[in-house]
């Protein structure tokens, strides 16, 4: 009886361990290939969110005025200019910014109160460049070199969106942080 | 007597298993797109996009007119061109209409033309409807009762549980195609 009980208990431990050994590597591959966020951090208005040793903060979302001569935007839409920041707060996070082979990527999408999402526009003619903000979290200096971001130093990033005019008021940001894991930072207004 | 009932029960259960196996949907049906039906002029809403087929025309040749009014070379076909004017928008995330096809009453399926300038070539954004043509090469004698199928995935095997439409285009009999048709491209509404 005791022997049977030990066998049953052993099975109870060994079977889940075997399943986990097989499933977990695949789960990671699945998350990477489908860009499924394994961790989601939300920052309420005016607060910062910390993800992968980086502090993310929404600075502002304002309505942009299209430049004269810019190709017209679709009817009943507005230009939204979002400025957000990232600051490495751990030594590991600094490495993500400095090493071009690390492959850090953090594209932002605009999300409104209804859950609708818009990617940032690649058009450079919509709003004038101000030269103060980066276009992405990583700045490539050379093929093998990034512009470093020291510990506790902030980098501000600007993203321009074209959104329906009814979305502008409730607009927030979602930043996908791709390190060796997939994370999602929600920055609310 | 008990043995007889056991045999009857076993045979009955086997019969039930056989019936269930016969009528149970296969993987293709279990994972088929979730299709919403509609008619010409009606707004058909799926989880991922909204589409309204507005008008259908047939022609022996079609020519595209660009934004500046220049008319391209005529495109001919051994059958007829079926042009479906439609308006579509994404529901919550940017997407392209893919796997756009028409299905005849006999079950033959014709994929949309790969000509540029049609509605299935533009990226649709949430809340920003786009109007434009969808183009098909079809045999004129087979278009009665044709339905428009729209998906977000071009590969049939990858349309698992995605949104889809089946829109009755209201085509009756054999159409009399126009010799040539000049069609504009897509425009944001």
Image (spheres, coloured by chain):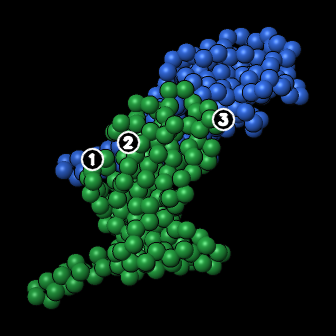
The residue shown at (31%, 66%) is: A50
Residue A71: horizontal and vertical position, in percent? 65, 35
Using the rendered image of the protein, determine whether residue B27 is visible from the camera's viewpoint.
no
The residue mark sitting in front, 3 or 1, is 3
As drawn, the residue found furthest toward the left would be A1
Mark 1 residue crowding within 10 angstroms, few (<14) / some (14–19) / many (20+): few
Q: Chain of mark 2?
A: A
Q: Nearer the viewer, residue B86 or A51?
A: A51
SS state under label 3: loop
Residue B177: horizontal and vertical position, in percent? 81, 13
Q: Provide the residue designation for mark 3.
A: A69
Residue A57: horizontal and vertical position, in percent? 34, 59
The residue shown at (57%, 30%) is: A74
| Mark before the other along the chain sequence, 3 or 2 | 3
SS state under label 2: loop
Q: Quadrant of residue B141?
A: top right
Q: Colour of chain A?
A: green
State yes or no: discs 2 and 1 in contact (Cβ < 8 Å). Answer: no
Q: In this image, A129 relative to A151: left or right?
A: right
Q: Chain of mark 1?
A: B
Q: Provide the residue designation for mark 1.
A: B9
Establish if B144 lies above or below B34. Answer: above
């Amino acid at each position: 009886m005791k022997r049977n009980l030990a066998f049953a208990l052993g099975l109870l431990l060994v079977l889940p361990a075997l399943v986990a050994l097989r499933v977990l590597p695949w789960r990671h591959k699945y998350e990477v290939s489908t860009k499924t966020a394994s961790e989601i951090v939300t920052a309420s208005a005016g607060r910062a969110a910390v993800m992968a040793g980086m502090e993310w903060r929404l600075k502002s979302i304002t309505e942009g005025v299209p430049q004269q001569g810019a190709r017209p935007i679709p009817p009943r839409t507005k230009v939204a200019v979002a400025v957000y920041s990232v600051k490495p707060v751990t030594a590991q996070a600094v490495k993500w910014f400095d090493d071009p082979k690390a492959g850090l990527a953090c594209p932002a999408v605009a999300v409104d109160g209804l859950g609708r999402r818009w990617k940032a526009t690649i058009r450079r003619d919509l709003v004038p460049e101000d030269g103060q903000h980066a276009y992405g979290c990583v700045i490539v200096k050379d093929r093998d070199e990034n512009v470093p971001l020291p510990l506790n130093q902030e980098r501000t990033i600007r993203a321009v969106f074209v959104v329906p005019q009814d979305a502008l008021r409730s607009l927030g940001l979602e930043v996908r942080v791709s390190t060796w894991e997939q994370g999602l930072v929600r920055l609310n207004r | 007597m008990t043995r007889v009932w056991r045999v009857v029960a076993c045979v009955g259960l086997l019969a039930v298993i056989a019936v269930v196996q016969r009528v149970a949907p296969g993987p293709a049906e279990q994972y088929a797109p979730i299709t919403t039906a509609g008619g010409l002029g009606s707004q058909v809403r799926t989880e991922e996009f909204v589409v309204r087929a507005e008008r259908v025309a047939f022609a022996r040749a079609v020519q595209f007119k660009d934004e500046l009014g220049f008319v391209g070379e005529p495109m001919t076909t051994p059958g007829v061109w079926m042009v479906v004017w439609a308006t579509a928008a994404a529901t919550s995330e940017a997407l392209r209409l893919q796997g756009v096809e028409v299905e005849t009453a006999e079950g033959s399926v014709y994929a949309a033309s790969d000509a540029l300038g049609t509605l299935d070539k533009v990226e649709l954004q949430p809340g920003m409807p786009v109007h434009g043509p969808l183009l098909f090469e079809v045999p004129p004698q087979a278009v009665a009762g044709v339905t428009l199928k729209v998906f977000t995935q071009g590969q049939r095997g990858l349309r698992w549980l995605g949104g889809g439409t089946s829109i009755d285009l209201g085509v009756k009999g054999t159409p009399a195609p126009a010799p040539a048709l000049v069609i504009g491209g897509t425009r944001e509404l």
